[in-house]
Image (cartoon, rainbow, N blue to C red):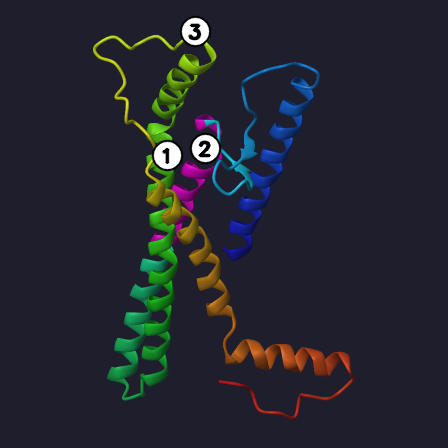
Amino acid sequence: MHRSFWLLRLLRLLLLVLIEFKCSVRLRGVRSSRPCGQAGDVLSGVCFVGQLDTHSLAMFLLIPLVIYLSIGGIFLLAGFVSLFRIRTVMKHDGTRTDKLERLMLRIGFFSGLFILPSLGYLACLFYEYYHFDDWMIQWNRQMCKIFSIPCPAVRHGGGQPDDDKPIFHIYMVKYVCSMLVGVTSSVWLWSGKTVVSWRQFAERIQGKDTRSRGAYV
């Protein structure tokens, strides 16, 4: 299952690269205001998907993230149900469940640290997706007055508010949440077992025999 998720992410990346290549070939030598799927971030300057195109934002970020989080939440819930059943059986048999309970607490703690920033990042993306077109119209309306170019037409039923601008703090929350997901994953990986595994791997490369040592529990 873990390999299947990584395969899906790889296919998404390959599809994005293919679309970006076709877009760059189509727009080569042609002046066009239509952005490709990937563009530079306005604040950080980092190239990413869906910065100036809401279609790419929905197809390559919002929909995949919702699918990944939904499937991951289902499997997490199923895993906790199985662990609680195992814990109940072990208690009926008189077996100690200290290690199993510590494992359950650790899984729950790190799952929360991973899911909450992911939900925050997803909420920021939805906020950006919902308001981006209005922000661009407002920006064009301000620029047309400065450069004396045709201004965007006012929508029927009322015009755009003059203060319709993105909230800076929401973008900061998006950046922090995107980094917290990686930090949480690295903290989960760098445990005592990871250090012992890497040490045994290095000793095997050096030709040392580690089979006589007891297993790390």
Report how far apart the C-alphas of labels 2 and 3 lie in the structure.
Answer: 28 Å
Seen in the picture, residue 106 relative to 116 is either above or below; the reply is: below
Residue 170 placement (x, y as % from top left): 34, 43
Q: Does the magenta stretch include residue 132?
A: no
* Amino acid at the residue labelled 2: Leu
Q: Is mark 3 on a helix, strand or loop?
A: loop
Q: What secondary structure characterizes most of the magenta part?
A: helix
- Disc nearer the start of the sequence (1/3): 1
Q: Which region is colored magenta?
A: 54-74
Q: Is residue 67 magenta?
A: yes
Give the residue displayed 22% in from the left and 12% down from the top.
158
Few, some or many C-alpha atoms within 10 Å of disc 3 (few <14, some 14-19, many ≥20)? Answer: few
Q: Do the residues labelled 1 and 2 touch (CB within 8 Å)?
A: yes
Q: What element carries label 2?
A: helix
**Mark sitting on residue 175:** none
Give the residue displayed 41% in from the left and 37% down from the top.
62
- Disc nearer the start of the sequence (1/2): 2
Is residue 1 left or right of 202 when viewed as pictured?
A: left
Give the residue displayed 36% in from the left and 49% down from the top.
173
Q: What element carries label 1?
A: helix
From this viewpoint, which residue is outermost toward the right?
207
Seen in the picture, residue 141 relative to 65 is either above or below; the reply is: above
* Amino acid at the residue labelled 3: Pro
The quarter of the picture where residue 24 lies is: top right
- Disc 1 marks which residue? 128
* Amino acid at the residue labelled 1: Glu
- Disc 2 marks which residue? 57
In terms of depth relative to the viewer, which is nearer, 17 or 93? Answer: 17
From this viewpoint, which residue is outermost toward the left?
157
- Disc 3 marks which residue? 150
Is residue 192 left or right of 208 when viewed as pictured?
A: left
